[in-house]
Image (spheres, rainbow, N blue to C red):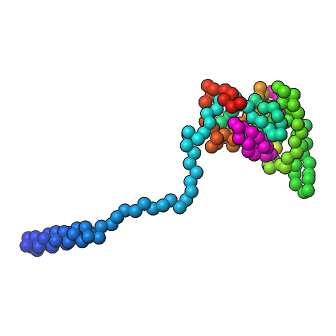
């Protein structure tokens, strides 16, 4: 029996060696497989570092609004007056007035309603309308979603949420007014 195991061991060893020798002749060369999916990677160095309060321009208005930066807010918000819903060509629209408290500049906007929201507060529910606005923020012009709210009791007329911040800025609350 020992002779059989010894012969099997020699046979296995010779098979192993023959495999190694043949693998040297037909060595497998690793290749780099190209990535076929395009991933968007935002590096920290590509993002602006902004403070807790920054200016935002609601186009076509000429004067900037002081905006509180709020990383906890999903959607940005604006202080609006005279909010009136109406129908245009079978679609729901809204008319609203925005007055810059600092400069006194006033503009009336008409926008299609993107969504009617119910915001739950601790003591009540608040109805808000979501619209798309053209803005200039940090030298870049783009369109973004805002909810319309009565912000008379707030120091800042605009609140900038994650829908604007994501992919554009990193917030350092020790700073303020990094944008001009």
Q: Please tell me which residue lies in front, 149 or 162.
A: 162
123 to 5, vertically: above or below: above
| Residue at horizontal 69 percent and vertical 43 percent from the top | 163
Q: Which of 150 and 138 is in front in this view?
A: 138
Answer whether residue 78 is visible to the viewer in this image: yes
* Position of the C terminus by quadrant: top right
State which region is magenta: 130-153
- Residue 88 picture location, percent across and down: 91, 53
Q: How many labels does the image show?
A: 0
The extreme left residue here reads: 3
137 drawn magenta: yes
Our reading of the magenta stretch's main secondary structure is strand
Residue 59 drawn at (x, y percent): 81, 40
- In this rendering, the answer to whether 52 lies above or below 108 is above
81 relative to 177 in the view: left or right = right
User: Could you say which is closer to the camera, residue 82 or residue 1?
Assistant: 82
Name the foreground residue: 108 vs 1.
Answer: 108
Q: Which residue is found at the position 48% from the left and 61% from the top?
A: 34
Relative to 33, is 11 above or below? Answer: below
**Residue 38 location (% of width, % of height):** 57, 57
Q: Is 30 left or right of 142, judged from the image as shown?
A: left
Can residue 126 be seen in the rendering of this structure? Answer: no
User: In the image, what residue occupies the spot 33% across and 66% down?
Assistant: 28
Is residue 92 found left or right of 3 in the rendered image? right
Q: Quadrant of residue 18?
A: bottom left
State which quadrant residue 130 falls in.
top right
Q: Residue at x 58, y 51 (%)?
A: 40
x and y percent of residue 77 in the render?
Answer: 76, 38
The N terminus lies in which quarter of the figure? bottom left
Residue 143 lies in the magenta stretch? yes
Location of residue 125 by image quarter: top right
């Amino acid at each position: 029996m020992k002779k059989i195991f010894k012969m099997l061991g020699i046979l296995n060893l010779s098979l192993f060696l023959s495999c190694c020798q043949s693998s040297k002749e037909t060595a497998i060369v690793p290749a780099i497989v190209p990535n076929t999916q395009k991933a968007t990677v935002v590096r920290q160095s590509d993002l602006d570092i902004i403070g807790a309060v920054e200016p935002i321009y609601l186009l076509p208005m000429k004067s900037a609004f002081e905006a509180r930066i709020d990383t906890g807010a999903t959607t940005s918000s604006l202080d609006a007056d005279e909010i009136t819903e109406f129908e245009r060509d079978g679609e729901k629209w809204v008319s609203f007035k925005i007055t810059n408290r600092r400069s006194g500049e006033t503009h009336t906007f008409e926008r299609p309603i993107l969504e009617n929201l119910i915001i739950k507060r601790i003591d009540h529910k608040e109805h808000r309308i979501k619209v798309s606005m053209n803005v200039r923020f940090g030298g870049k012009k783009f369109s973004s979603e805002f909810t319309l709210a009565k912000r008379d009791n707030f120091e800042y007329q605009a609140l900038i949420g994650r829908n604007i911040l994501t992919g554009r800025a990193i917030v350092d609350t020790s700073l303020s007014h990094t944008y001009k």
